[in-house]
C-alpha cells in the first residue's frame, strides 16, 4: 500500500533515499505549471538550534550555485519551509560506487580496467570544474570537496557518473570555519596531510586514487576496526600496488593510481585536469576503451549476478611476491554491448576476466609413497636386527 506523499511547500515528498549526520534526502516531486512533474532529490536539514549545522547547510547551498557540470548533480532551488532548510537537487537514478564495489566483491571480483578508467576520468573532470570555479568577480573560490568517497558517486542510468553531497566542501564563500584539529570526511578517504592539519585540492585526488584501487581490486584499502586504526593506516601503512590483488592491472594504470596515492602532496598529481588527461590517454590505447553505454551495461549485468564469493581483505603489508589466489571458478562472461555507431570509434572491450589459478593434477589411483622417511629407516633397522638375532639363536642350537 502506497503512503500519501508529504506536502512540503511546493513539493510532494516520498520515500527517504539517504540519511546523513545532519540531513535526510527524499525523492520528491515538484508540479510544474504546464502539468508536468519534475523529480528532485530533496535534502532537508534536521531541526536544530546549532548554528554550526545551519551554517554548513547554507554553505553547501551557496557552493552549489557555482557548480554546473554534467558530472555534478544539478541544484534547482534552496530555502526554508516551515522553519526547515532545504536544497532541491537533481534526482539521479542508479547505484553508488559503494554499492558497485560491494556487489563486485561477492560476485565477479574487480571492476575491469576500461570501466575504471572511464569512471575515474569522469570524476576528475567534475573535480577540475569544482577546483577551478570563480565567483562573479572572477576570484577563485578554492572549492575542495573533502568527502570524495564511493558513497557520494552515483552511476546514472546512462552511465554518466554524478558527484553529489558538497555538504563538507570547503570554499572561500563558506561562512563556517573548521576548528583546528577537526577532520571532516570519511577517515578511510582522508588525505594524510589533512590529518596533519594541511589541506588543498590535492586531498581530493588522494581520494580518487583510493577509489580507483578499490574498483580495481574489490577491496577496501585503509579501513580499520575504528577511527584511530584507520587514520594510523592512512599515515603509515605500506600501500600495496593494485596489481598484487589483480594481476590484470597494467603498469600504465598502476602508475596513475600509485601517483595519486603519494603521501607527499608535492609528488601527487598536481591537478585533476592532469590526472584526467593521463587517464584518457591510457583509455585511448587498444583494449582500454569503454564508453558510457558499455559502463552501464556492465554495471547492470553485475547486479544480476548471484552472490557467492567471499569478500577479500587488503594485506597490511606489501609482499615481495604475490600470494597464490585460492582456486575458484571463472566468472561468467559479461554481455557484449553493441559497438558505437561512429566508424572512427573503437568498440568497447570485453570485460577482462580474473585469472583462475591452475590446480595440480590429482593421482587417480591409490596414493603411492614417493619419499623415504626417517621412520622407514628405523623400521628396517629393527627388522634386520631381529633377523640376525633369530639366525644366531639357530646356529647356537646347532653347535651345542
Image (cartoon, helix red, strand yellow):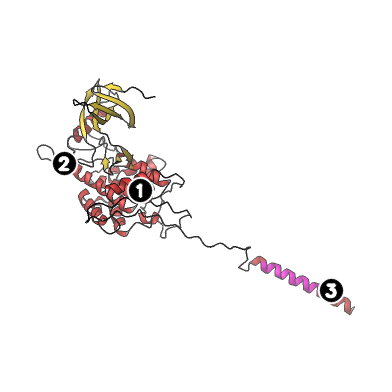
Numbered range of the magenta stretch: 376-390
Q: Nearer the viewer, residue 244 or 34?
A: 34
- The residue pinned by badge 1 equals 214
Can residue 176 be seen? no
- Of residues 252 and 392, the one drawn nearer to the viewer in this rendering: 252
Could you tell me if residue 291 is visible in this image? Answer: yes
Closer-to-camera residue (147/128):
128
Q: Which residue corresponds to the image point at 22% horizontal and 44% vertical from the top-left?
A: 126
Image depth: mark 1 or mark 3 in front:
1
Q: In x, y percent, where is residue 94?
A: 32, 39
Question: Where does the C terminus fall, quadrant-wise?
Answer: bottom right
Is-magenta flag for residue 120?
no
49 versus 384 height, above or below: above
Residue 147, placed above or below residue 246: above
Q: In which quarter of the image is the N terminus?
A: top left
Residue 124: % across, % down: 24, 47
Q: Which residue is drawn at 25% across and 29% down?
A: 52
- Badge 3: residue crowd in 10 Å (few <14, some 14–19, many ≥20): few
Q: Measured from the top left, where is residue 130 in percent x and y?
A: 20, 42
Check disc 3 and report the residue beneath it. Answer: 393
C-alpha separation, residue under disc 1 versus residue under disc 2: 29 Å
Chief secondary structure of the magenta span?
Answer: helix
206 vs 48: above or below: below
Nearer the N terminus, badge 1 or badge 3?
A: 1
Whichever of labels 1 and 2 marks the residue nearer the N terminus, that label is 2
Q: Counting other residues with Cα less than 10 Å from the Cα at mark 1, is it few (<14), some (14-19), or many (20 or more)?
A: many
Disc 2 target residue: 133
SS for tag 1? Answer: helix
Q: How crowded is mark 2: few (under 14 residues within 10 Å), some or many (20 or more)?
A: many
Real-space Cα distance between discs 2 and 3?
106 Å
Relative to 362, 161 lies left or right? left
| Residue 243 image position (x, y, % from top left) | 36, 56
Amino acid at each position: 500500500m502506497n503512503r500519501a506523499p508529504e506536502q512540503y511547500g511546493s513539493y510532494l515528498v516520498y520515500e527517504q533515499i539517504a540519511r546523513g549526520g545532519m540531513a535526510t534526502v527524499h525523492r520528491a516531486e515538484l508540479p510544474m505549471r504546464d502539468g508536468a512533474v519534475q523529480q528532485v532529490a530533496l535534502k532537508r536539514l534536521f531541526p536544530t538550534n546549532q548554528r554550526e549545522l545551519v551554517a554548513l547547510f547554507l554553505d553547501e547551498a551557496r557552493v552549489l550555485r557555482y557548480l554546473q557540470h554534467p558530472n555534478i548533480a544539478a541544484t534547482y532551488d534552496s530555502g526554508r519551509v516551515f522553519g526547515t532548510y532545504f536544497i532541491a537537487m537533481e534526482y539521479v537514478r542508479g547505484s553508488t560506487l559503494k554499492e558497485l564495489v560491494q556487489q563486485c566483491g561477492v560476485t565477479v571480483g574487480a571492476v575491469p580496467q576500461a570501466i575504471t578508467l572511464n569512471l575515474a576520468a569522469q570524476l576528475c573532470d567534475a573535480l577540475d570544474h569544482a577546483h577551478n570555479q570563480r565567483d562573479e568577480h572572477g576570484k577563485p573560490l578554492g572549492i575542495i570537496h573533502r568527502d570524495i568517497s564511493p558513497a557520494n558517486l552515483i552511476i546514472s542510468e546512462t552511465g554518466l557518473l554524478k558527484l553529489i553531497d558538497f555538504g563538507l566542501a570547503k570554499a572561500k564563500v563558506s561562512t563556517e570555519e573548521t576548528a583546528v584539529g577537526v577532520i571532516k570526511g570519511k577517515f578511510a578517504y582522508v588525505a594524510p596531510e589533512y590529518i596533519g592539519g594541511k589541506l588543498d585540492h590535492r586531498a581530493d585526488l588522494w581520494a580518487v586514487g583510493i577509489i580507483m584501487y578499490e574498483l580495481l581490486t574489490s577491496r577496501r584499502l585503509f579501513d580499520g576496526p575504528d577511527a584511530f586504526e584507520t587514520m594510523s593506516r592512512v599515515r603509515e601503512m605500506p600501500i600495496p600496488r593494485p596489481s598484487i590483488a589483480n594481476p590484470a592491472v597494467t603498469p600504465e594504470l598502476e602508475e596513475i593510481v600509485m601517483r595519486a596515492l603519494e603521501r607527499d602532496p608535492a609528488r601527487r598529481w598536481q591537478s585533476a585536469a592532469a590526472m584526467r588527461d593521463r587517464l584518457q590517454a591510457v583509455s585511448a590505447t587498444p583494449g582500454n576503451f569503454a564508453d558510457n553505454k558499455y559502463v552501464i551495461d556492465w554495471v547492470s549485468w553485475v547486479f544480476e549476478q548471484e552472490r557467492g564469493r567471499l569478500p577479500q581483505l587488503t594485506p597490511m603489508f606489501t609482499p615481495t611476491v604475490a600470494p597464490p589466489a585460492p582456486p575458484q571458478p571463472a566468472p561468467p562472461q559479461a554481455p557484449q554491448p553493441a559497438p558505437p555507431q561512429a566508424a572512427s570509434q573503437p568498440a568497447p572491450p570485453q570485460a577482462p576476466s580474473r585469472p583462475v589459478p591452475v590446480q595440480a593434477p590429482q593421482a587417480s589411483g591409490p596414493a603411492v609413497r614417493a619419499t623415504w622417511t626417517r621412520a622407514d629407516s628405523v623400521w628396517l633397522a629393527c627388522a634386520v636386527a631381529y633377523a640376525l638375532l633369530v639366525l644366531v639363536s639357530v646356529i647356537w642350537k646347532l653347535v651345542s
